[in-house]
Each structure stands twice: as structure tokens, then as C-alpha cells.
Amino acid sequence: MNISSNKLVKSVVAILVLIEVSCSSPVEKTKSVQLLHEQAMELVKSSKLDSAAIIFKMLITHDPNHYVALLGLAEINLRKKNIPNAVLYLKKAMNADSSRVEAAFQLSQIYRITGKEKKAKQILAQLVKKFPTYSPACMAYADVLMTDAPPNPEGALSQYESILSLTPESKKAQAGAAASRLRLGEFSRAASGFKKLLKSTPRDPHLTFLYATTLHWLQDFETAIKAYQTAIDVLPSGSPLRTVRLWNLRLAYTALHGKYPGDLPPNHIFQIKPQKESATVKFVDVAHQMGVDKIDRGRGAAWADLDGNGSLDLFTVGISTPHGLYLRETNDFIEPNNRSSLDEIEGGWSAAIADYDNDGDFDIYVTRDAWEGPQKNSLYSNDGKAQFTDVADEFGVLDENDSFTAAWGDMNSDGWLDLYVANGVTGSGASNNLFISQSGQNFNERASNWRVADKGTSLGIALGDYDLDGDLDIYVSNVSGPNKLYRNDGESFTDITTIAGVENPLNGSYIPLFFDSDSDGDLDLFVSAMSYYEDVVESIKSSGETFRNPAHLYRNDGNNVFFERAVDAGIARSFGAMGAGVGDLDNDGLADLYLANGGPLMARFEPNALFIRRENSYLEIGQQAGVANIGKGHGVAFADVDENGALDIYLGSGGHYPGDVWANSLYLNTGPSFKGVSIQLNGANNNQFGVGANVIVHSGTNRRLQRLDAGSGFGSTNSYSLHYGLGIHNRIDSVYISWPNGQHKMHYPKGEERNLIFDYSLHHRDK
């Protein structure tokens, strides 16, 4: 302590002693202490923090519960960037006087800037309840609710309205209320709010774009075009935001006129890279005609014959809505009135179909609304006639965590399907669970024993025998942090992510898919990512470049190592890929890739993408093929619905916010010129549908491996009929089947049969 500090200490001590001796009343003491506090605050303003701290500490020595002194010390430590000490003093101040708001509010803001959003939210929730007229807390709480996971625009709107009731002219609260209404789907009121604000700030770069977006949702494209033009013109010439706004302007022009007008200035034109060739496949959306165009912010979907009548049925899940059950009768789908447990539970993300009890019918596992936090999942047991009973609790697979996706597979090769569930997507710290079947009677959770209890923010699961050793390996995508590849060693798994080189993308990973991308007879790996909208739009505009957080395509070299091939394959682009599916959509014998894209922002209008395989690379033809809608796609499930020998696509659509609603789609494939063949497997008694089998088909020069999976993409399930395109060839030459229990068989089909059935029981001894 220097001389001046010593003098200051002595001076403060003397003053405190004088206060005690000479001040005859509490009022006088309070006034005197207040003078010391004011002196300390003046020192803070003058950045004489150490001197101010001396006074505050002496005041606390005199009175340990001196609220304003504790606040002062907190501020000093904040200025010195000593966050732990600042937090300590704020907590002491809160304990000293719980009737005051300042300390708690400051603590909440520290938690916000240090990434502790949950703690900040808890404090702010208490403050707005206790101090409903304290506008800073109401505003901060509203902002937290708008950016929360999941966001709560309804709660945020309530706070903004509370502020406006006290201070009607608050521009920030007016803007927040309008943005909340946009997310809630109150588009007319949101537009009015933005329009009013723009009267005083007509060139605000943020508000102009939000106003244009709201008009876009109202389908007032003529006015939206003018608003987008303003939103572009107010930006600096080099602003990275221009590209997004130009793209949205293009969409508005297309919706209104089908094209750009001839006199549009060049600085308002979004140039798209030219298409290399015409689409060889065409789709038409028949969801409305067939009665499956539900608006439920669609998530997972699954195809299977659920009622045992020989026709494919459709099961879907969406946010906060009853499940969709559509039973096929003749050419249409119907929703039955009585669906047992399905009528009692709402909401879901993943729909994984399998015959878990080997009774010959399809059962359904559903994960709940993951972003809403821990909830009970469901296992719907089928009586064979599409009457379902939830037996999750009875069978030990409730998994009351923040589950996202699930997939079925025989992990221990005992013939009974096990269940792997991805948890922790909200950052809860919950581990992934592996439920091992006990001969179909119940399940035991064994993730830790099997060393696959990943504690990341797990979102996607891909199951596949990547090393062709006869057992099932697991790939897990984490929305933050490295992804994981677990090699099945028979009785446990080994994390070989680093060795294999498949940990990317490190942020925003969504959908992983194992498939034979290069037709060499082993499984490669595709991993999508949630990219920024700016990068997505740039990738639409540009050709040959790579972008932030692109999709990854890892080619399997057959020796436990994967090589990145996304650039070579032409798919190293930025997407908001939330759902994905792989199938030979044009029947040329090569695996194609369909991406269901989107993102939380209401202003994000990102087309879905269809990549058709062309020799060693992919060609994007979504717009030409008729499947490039912008409805925030999620669940993707393939099946030959109309039995014309070509794969069709079901797409669950809808965004993160209540107002971001789109009808689900069923795209019938009308365009492939080549023929296709379906292969159905009748498996062993304790795996009757052959889940996990690897099937390699040779047709002329075409060769392709497929796995029969029960859960893929955004928690969706394709039809159990494997589909192979023949390309220029007329027939299949050979079929090699590796059954889940390690048995193998080569088949040589005769003739040109388009629907093939292979029965394990007829050849289980052949190798």
C-alpha cells in the first residue's frame, strides 16, 4: 500500500469513527455514510478504482451488509475484468438486501455475456415476477426468450408489451414486439409494427429487411419487392448481407412474375450459376390429393405396412400435434378414428419403425420434442392391425432425456433388435443410451458397458457395418463438438473417430448417412451441417468454391480410414441440411442424395436440394426436378408409393417457430426413363424383416451396396423394400446378401422380375 493509500485509509477510518461518536441520530449517520459512498463513486468515474475500492471495503467493514458498497466493489471488479469477484460481490449484495433489483440484474447480465444463459434466464424470470415494472429486466428477459433453445416468442411478446404499457414510445420494445409477432405468425400485426417504426427510421438496415420478410410471409409480393429493394439500397456496397437480400428479392419476383422484369437494375439481380444439364427425373407433389398434406411443422416420417393389408402406410410426427397415421386404401390414404395410444400423445421428432418383438408386424419408437427439454419417449407396440399401445415404460425404453433421434439395429448379433438413442442436444449433459433387447421381452440400458455413452450434444445417428466385419458400427453427429465413430468389437465399441478422420463438422452437425457413394461395395459417410444463411446463398450463386461449415462426404478406403471427397464430388457446399435421404431416384444404378434444408430464421428461404450422381460427382437439379421447395424440410422418407418402379419422396416440413408453417409434401416420381427393381428380405425367425442386412446388386457394369436400416436421416424410416435402378440394363445379374447374423448367399435371378423376395430360411446354411 502506497503513502496516498495509507492516508486515504486513515482518513476513511477517522471519518467512520467520527460518524459513530458525533452523529447522534441514524439519519445523520446515513447521510454521512452516503457522503463517503458518493466520494467513492466519484473516484470510480475518474477511474481511480483502487482508491474507490478502499472506501467501499471500509464501508463494508463498518457494515457487512452495505448494499451500495457491495455493488460498487462488483462494478470495480467488472472494470478490472475480474468476473469471479464481481459475481461474489453481487451475490453478497443480493443476500444483504433482497428487496432491491440492481445486484440481481447485473448478475444476470454477467451470466449472459459469459454464456451462462440458463442461469441468466432463471434470475431474470424471478426479477420480472418480483419487479414487473423494472423495464431493463423485462427487456433483457424478452431478449433471452427470443434467443432461447427453444425460443419462446410468445413469452417475449408478453414482456415487450409490459414495457410498452409503461413506456409506449420505447423503440426497442416496439421492434421486439413486431419481431415476436413475426415468429408467432401474426404477420399483419408484425407488418404494421415494422411500418410504424420505419416512419421515423426509414433507412434502418435491420428493420427494412424484417419488414420485407413479413410482407413476404403475407404473400404481398409487390410491396415486399419494394421493401427488399430498400433493404438492399441502405446497405454499404460491400456488405455481406446484400447477397441474402438479393436472393430473397429474387424469390419475391419469381413468386409474383415468374421471373425478373426486363428493366431491373443490375445491382438488384441475383445471378445463379447456369445448370449443366436438364433433369432426368421429375416429381409432382400429390400430398393434398392423397390426404397427407398435414401442417404440423413435420419432423420424422416412416413407411411400412402397419395394418397388414399388403400396402404401404405412412406414419409421421410433428411439433405439439397428434401423430399422423395414414393407412393406404386403394389409391388414397385415410386416417383411422381409433388409433389407441396414438390419440393420447402429441409431439415428436424421430420415427423409427422396426419389429422389436419379432411378432411379424411393425412397431414404432418415437422421440419427443427434443428442444423442449427432457420428455418421455414412446414405444408403440402394434397388434398387427394398426392398433398401438405405448409400452415404453414397461419395456424400459422411456429415456426421459432431451432425445433427438433413434435407430434400431442388432448390436450384439443375437438376432434381436436393439435401440440406440441420441441425447443431450440442448446441452443438458445427458448421455446417449443403448438399449439391449432381452429376447424381445424388455430392454436393458448398456451404453456405458458398451462404451457408447456419448455425452455430447447428440443429434444424428447412422448405423452401418463400415468395416465389413459382420457387426454393426455407430456414427453419432453432435451439434457442437466433434462427431464420433464407434467400431463394434463384438462385446463393446471403440472410439476410432480420430484414426478414421471423421470428426467434422465440429459445429452444427446434423444428419449422418452411411451409403455406398462410389459403388465400390463398402459404406461411405455423408454428414450435413447447419450453415449460415449467408453462406448458403453464396453457395447457390457460386461454383467450385468451398464455404464455412460445408457438408462432408467421407470415402471409405476399406482400412478403417476415410478420406474427404466432398469437393471432388461437388457437394462441398453450405446447406442448412436438417433432413436427408439416399436412394437411386433416377434408376441409373447410382445413389442420389436429397437434402431437406432450412434454418430457424423466419427470413431464411432456402431451397431443398436434389443431387443426382453422375459418374464421380453430383449434379444439383432440385429446381428442375420439382422438389426444391423452401418449406424448412426435416423428415425425408423414400418409398415406391405408386408401385411404378421409381422411388417417391415424403417430406415433413415446418420451421422452428410457431409461425413458420408449411404443408408436408408427397412427391411422386414421374420421370425416370430407366427401370427399377425392389428387393424384399424375409429374415430369420428373430429378425423377420432382415434389418441390418447388406445387399450388393450387380447389373451389367453397375454395382451398389445397400443396407436395410430401421431409422435414418432426421429420425425417419424408408420402406423396407430395397430399391435398385438398372440403368441401361434390363435385368439383375447377381445379388449378394450378407445377413445380420453373418450368413452369406449369392443369388442369380432369372428373367426380368421387378419384385424380388429372398428368404433367409431357404438358404441359411449357404455361404
Image (spheres, rainbow, N blue to C red):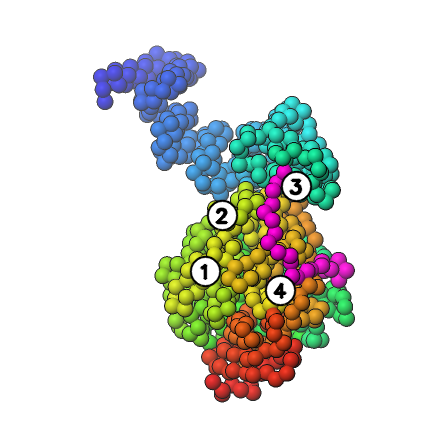
Could you say where residue 58 lies in the image, as x and y percent from the top left? 32, 22
Q: Is residue 250 visible?
A: yes
- Give me the C-alpha separation between circle 2 and circle 3: 22 Å
Mark 3 crowd level (few <14, some 14–19, many ≥20, 10 Å Cα): many
Callout 3, which amino acid? Arg
Residue indicated by mark 2:
545
User: What is the magenta range?
Assistant: 269-292
Magenta-span inclusion, residue 160: no
- Front position in the image: 161 or 153: 153
Dot 1 or dot 2: first in sequence order is 2
* 554 to the left or right of 629: left
Q: Is residue 457 above or below residue 17?
A: below
Dot 2 or dot 3: first in sequence order is 3
Residue indicated by mark 3:
250
- Give the residue displayed 50% in from the left and 58% down from the top: 569
- Give the residue displayed 61% in from the left and 80% down from the top: 757
Callout 2, which amino acid? Glu
Could you say where residue 517 lies in the image, as x and y percent from the top left? 51, 64
* 223 to the left or right of 430: right
